[in-house]
Amino acid sequence: MEKSRVKTYTRLILSIVVCQIAGIIGSFLTTPAIPTWYARLRKPDFAPPNWVFVPVWMLLYLLMGISLFILWNAGLEKSNVKKSVSIFSVQLVLNILWSYFFFGLQSPLLGLVEIIALWVAIVLTIVFSFRVSKVAASLLIPYLLWVSFASYLNYLVMILNP
């Protein structure tokens, strides 16, 4: 296999792994609270069952990883690519922090404040990514939609559990 192809596949794998690691870190923060604190919370009737979250997030992290790969592959030496990847990195950290605030600290209020920041960061990531690759930006749309839904759920959990 030629050297450039190996480099491309390595970037793809690393991009996906980085995003999946963010998910794994988030799950370490989330999992202990599911059968205890989260189970006792009042939730809206349309809240998905717990088993839905793992496959949805795995798919979203996969799409995020592919998006990151497309950006990275466009050339980190370019300023617009560097900006896109930087903003992508910020939203990935904010993604992890939501699990810490909501589940780790068991604070729907802090979770709501944080998830709003995450939502803004995702929108900025999409906007800046669009300038590099429409495909990379489009791959983040399901993530934005899910986080929008999760934001609403977070808000309702906060309201239902004063």
Image: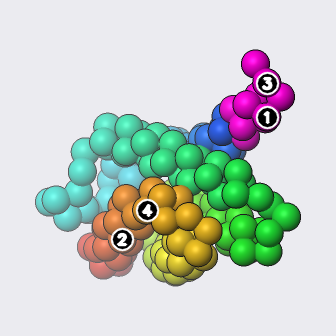
Residue beneath the point at 30% across and 42% down: 52
Q: How many marks?
A: 4
Residue 125 placed where, x, y %? 58, 72
Q: Magenta stretch containing residue 75, yes or no?
A: no
Question: Which SS does the magenta portion mostly show?
Answer: helix
Q: CA distance from mark 2 to mark 3?
A: 42 Å
Q: Earlier in the sequence, mark 2 or mark 3?
A: 3
Give the amino acid type for the residue marked by disc 1 in the picture. Answer: Ser
Query: Which one is nearer the viewer's eye here, 127 or 40?
Result: 127
State the SS at label 2: helix
Give the labeled residue for mark 1. Answer: 4
Report the disc number at residue 148.
2
The part of the chain drawn in magenta is 1-11
- Residue in front for this viewpoint, 7 or 52: 7
- Image: 153 above or below 159: above
Q: Quadrant of the C terminus?
A: bottom left
- Left-right relation of 21 to 42: right
Asked if marks 3 and 1 touch (Cβ < 8 Å), the reply is yes
Neighbours of disc 2 within 10 Å: few (<14), some (14-19), many (20+): some
- State the separation of the CA atoms marked 4 and 3: 30 Å
Name the residue carrying label 4. 138
Compute the Cα span from label 1 to label 2: 38 Å
Q: Is residue 60 left or right of residue 81?
A: left
Q: Residues within 10 Å of mark 4 (few under 14, many from 20)?
A: some
Tell me the residue that label 3 is attached to.
Answer: 2
Q: Quadrant of residue 41?
A: bottom left
Query: Which is in the foreground here, disc 4 or disc 2?
Result: 4
Which callout, 1 or 2, points at the residue further toward the start of the chain? 1
Q: Identify residue type, mark 2.
A: Ser
The answer for how far apart the CA atoms under marks 4 and 1 are is 26 Å
